[in-house]
Every structure is written in structure tokens, then in C-alpha cells.
Amino acid sequence: MNKRFVIYIPLLLSVALVTGLFIGNSLNRNSQAVFNLSRLNQGNKLSSIIELIQTAYVDSVNTKEIVEKTIPDLLKNLDPHTSYIPASDMREVEEEMHGNFSGIGVQFSIQEDTVMVVDVISGGPSHKLGILAGDRIVTVNDSVIAGVNIRNEQVLRLLRGEKGTKVKVGIQRKGFPKLFDFEITRGDIPIYSVDVSYMIDNETGFIKVSRFAEQTYEEFMAGMEKLDKAGAQKVIVDLRGNPGGYLMAVIRMVDEFLQKGEPILFTQGKFQPKKIYNATARDTWDKKKVFVLIDEFSASASEIFAGALQDNDRAIVIGRRSFGKGLVQEQIPFSDGSAIRLTVARYYTPSGRSIQKPYDEGTDKYYEDLYNRMAHGEFEVADSIQFNDSLKYHTKSGRIVYGGGGIMPDVFVPADTSGRSEYFINIYQKGLVYQYAFQYADQHRTQLNSLKSAREIEQYLEQQNVLGDFVRYAASKGVAPDSKGLNESRVIIHTQLKAYIARNILGEEGFYPIIQQIDKTLLKAIEVSHQNLLVENLK
């Protein structure tokens, strides 16, 4: 090595050290300038972080995209119902509440990178084929969409499309190991709130309300007027599976059953003063006895309806404890077309019961509550909440009702598991009843179209060997005949076949009058109504 170079090494190192310190101090001063600027926003740490990324981060990034991805995660720390609606989703969200569109007819939510069916639009293509709320859409046209970070807009593009076009979906259903394969023909999706209204007998009317939207009140009143003209003295209002919706729709409906000044509900939040909603003396249906059906999927506005009539001793509530969704969301728009639905208050029934069930253990535990209730046997026996003295409230006449989340029915009806043989489970898993009914209706449409009522269709089908034909059809689809299982499930299978065939011809007017024969909750309501049971007798 050159001796002269060796001599200069300490000097070169000293120069490098001094130069490094100078550059480092210079960079530090520049960084401090940036950081000092960001401290102007120290009151809002999130804004500070975004500003730091924009002004000091090593690479170029799209901060707008980061914000869009971060907002949903931020809102998860609040309650299960506060949500963010990106601008790209807003049109679809509004369409489903205001008008028709072409698609398969499901509402979905992407949870844990899986497309979950939240609700099936009544009367739509998916509903007719037997797709259920809670199903997971795993494949679309043989392409896997689960576990691939798919976004809402991508799912919408896959499922929606021109009327008459087909799409194949693979469905995973809880409790079943294999996928269900459906080929769905896209169609116009009806956004009706009232599925059906018809007379059960000479004095008892039935009206099914599937959601609460802008036109629900008008639809409900039309259905009630139809029943009134037919001579209904008693009305069964079916809110089972109804997820809720517009607050003003349910308030106007309840108002038709109460006398002036009677309370409907009140809302209150930390920044929202107590707001009381009272009846305004409409009381159009004051002479009719009312029976309300609810179940574990009745939520929000459904619970307001049932709770208001129950607390005013105006109706007998029949079924199982409702979902427990009593949070008030206010939709706040942003300039880019997106919006946030922020929870601002809670709903309370007239007696003071909070409808909302606890959510302090997180969103996952919140949605697992229904499975836990089922596992604890609360779908088979009266719910344990009714034995908790701390949750007691009193109706207008002094009857005891219970809080704790959801509405507790006056008359409990367990979930119906009768007739569920292994044979039935196998055909149910494959969705064969729905598929056969659609095929049968399509092949016999000429004969069936000449029939004008559910009763006429049922009488016609009674003369055909529909059940025997179905058994052969099921065998062709991989479910071997099972005489023991068929005998055990004969009534439920045969009734479902007739009801679903009638639905494909007459819609819900064909379906409900037939399926009521095996609907244990509705049959219980009919029994109670015939006993002339008054709410006073329930004290």
C-alpha cells in the first residue's frame, strides 16, 4: 500500500466525518422544518399524519386512496352500524331504496374478504332460487372471489347486468361443507316493501312487510285497506326477517293504530337531546285487533313497530326475541359524493326500553350473538332475558316487558325443526325444491297461468304426482330416494313444492296462503286470534 495514502487516511476520515455531520444537520434542519409545519395540526393527529406523508415520505403515494381504505377501519372502532359509503357505491345504495335495477337481487357486505349475503330482495331472482341471508358468495362464473381482496364495485359489476342474462354463483352455506351452485337469470329487482296482503279466513287478515322504505307507508295503507274491504276484524302483521329501514315510514304506520298523544318512541344521544314521537290522532285502524310476528332477524324499524304497539297494549307480539338494532344513523354527505352513516342516538320504546343489544365486545361478537342464542337453546325455549329482574319494564296497563336488547314477544314460538330428516337436509342443501319448482312452473306455465289463486293452483297440483316426480328429480341430482326420510318429511316437502310452484306463477299471493300450512308461528298467531285473547289477559 502507498505509504503516502496511509498517512492521509486519518485526515480523509476526519473530513468525511465533518462533512457527514454537516449534511446530517442540514437534513435534520430541513426535516425539522417539515415537522414544525405539521405541528400546526397537532390538534388533529390524523390530519398531521396525512400531511407528513404528503410532505416528508420517501416515495410518492396516493394519500386519497390511503384515506379511503382507512376510513372503514377507523369506523370499526365505533359501533357495528356506523358505516362509510364510497362515492362509487352511493348510486347503488340509493337505487335499492328508491327504484328498480337489473341484477340477481341480493344485498351484500364484504366481511373478512368474503362476500356475505346480508339480505335477499323479496321476489327477485335469488329469492326465487332459495339463496338465503348469511350465504357466502365464493365463486362467480367459476372465478373465485373470496380471499382475493375484492371490492364492492367489482362485486356489483359481476352480479348486476342486463335483464335476461345469466350468471353462475357458488354459495357457501353455514353448516354445509359443499358449495351450492346456482345459475341465476338476472331480472328487474322489485323494491316493494309489502310482499302480500290476503284474508286467512272471513275475519282475519295477513300482511307481510319485508322492509321500511320511502313508499312503505303507502303500500302498507293500501294493503290494510284491501283487508278492511274484505271484512278483516283482526290483522296479523308479519315483520319476521324485516331488517328495518326508514324511521318516518314506521312512525306513520304506528300512528294509524294509536290514539292522539300516545307515545311511539323516543331517541336520545350524547349530542342529541331527547326527541319524543307521539301519535297524532290518525288511528285509522282503532277497531282492529292486531297481532305482530317477529323473529331473531326482525330489526330496527321492525322493533320500533312491535315495541310501540306492545308498550301501548295495542297488539300481541308473537314469535322470538328480535335482533336488537336500536341505533339511529344520520347520513352525512361529502363533496366527492361519498357519505358516512354515523350513529347519533339510540331508539327507546315508550316504556323506556333500549332496543339496542350490547356491542361492547366488538363487531364480531355482536354478529355472533344470534349463533350464541341458538347454541344456548333460546330458539327452542323462552329466552333467558325474561328472567332478569333488572331488565323489567311496564306497559301502559302495567304488564311486564323486558329490555336488554330486542323486543321480547308476548307469546313465544320455538323455531320449527319438525320434519327435518336426513333426506330433507340433503335436498335442502342442494336447493332442489326451489330448482324443481322453477322448472315445473316453466314446463307447465300454460296450464298454471289459467289458474287465478293459490287455492286453485294447490288443487291442481294435488291432482298431479308432483311429490313422486320430485323424488325422481332429486335422484337425478344425486339424492337417492329414502322412503323413511320421505315419510318423515312428506308434509313439509310437498307443501314447499306447491308453495314455490305457486310463487313462480302468482308471486307472493300464491306463495303465502300455501306455505302458511307449515308456518308454526303464523299458525300460533291464528290460534291466539281465534281465542279472542286480549293483551289484558297477558298480565
Image (spheres, rainbow, N blue to C red):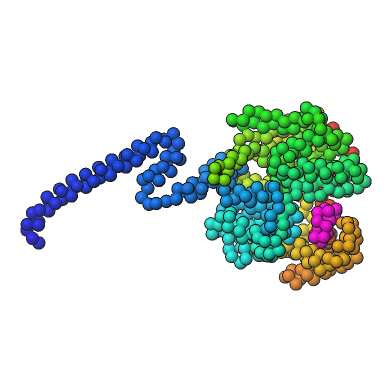
Name the dominant secondary structure of the magenta segment: helix
Quadrant where the C terminus is found in the figure: top right
Q: Is residue 142 magenta?
A: no
Residue that extends furthest to the bottom in the rendered view of this protein = 476
Name of the residue lying farthest toward the front:
335
Q: Residue at x 19, y 47 (%)?
A: 19
In front of the other: 208 or 52: 52
The image quadrant of residue 360 is: top right
* In this picture, residue 526 sits left or right of residue 477: right
Comparing 338 with 409, the one in front is 338
Q: Please indicate, yes or no, whether residue 157 appears anywhere in the rendered image.
A: yes
Location of residue 361 with respect to 259 vertically, above or below: below
Quick one: 380 or 174, which is closer to the camera? 174
- Residue 4: percent from the left, percent from the top? 6, 57
Point out the image quarter for the N terminus: bottom left
The region drawn magenta spans 501-514
**Is residue 511 covered in magenta?**
yes
From this view, report whether residue 121 is shown above or below residue 177.
above
Give the image location of residue 48, x and y in percent.
42, 39
- What's the residue at 25%, 45% (across, down)? 24
**Picture quadrant where residue 478 is located:** bottom right
Q: Position of residue 94 (x, y in %)?
A: 65, 47
Residue 190 rendering spot, x and y as whole percentages: 74, 53
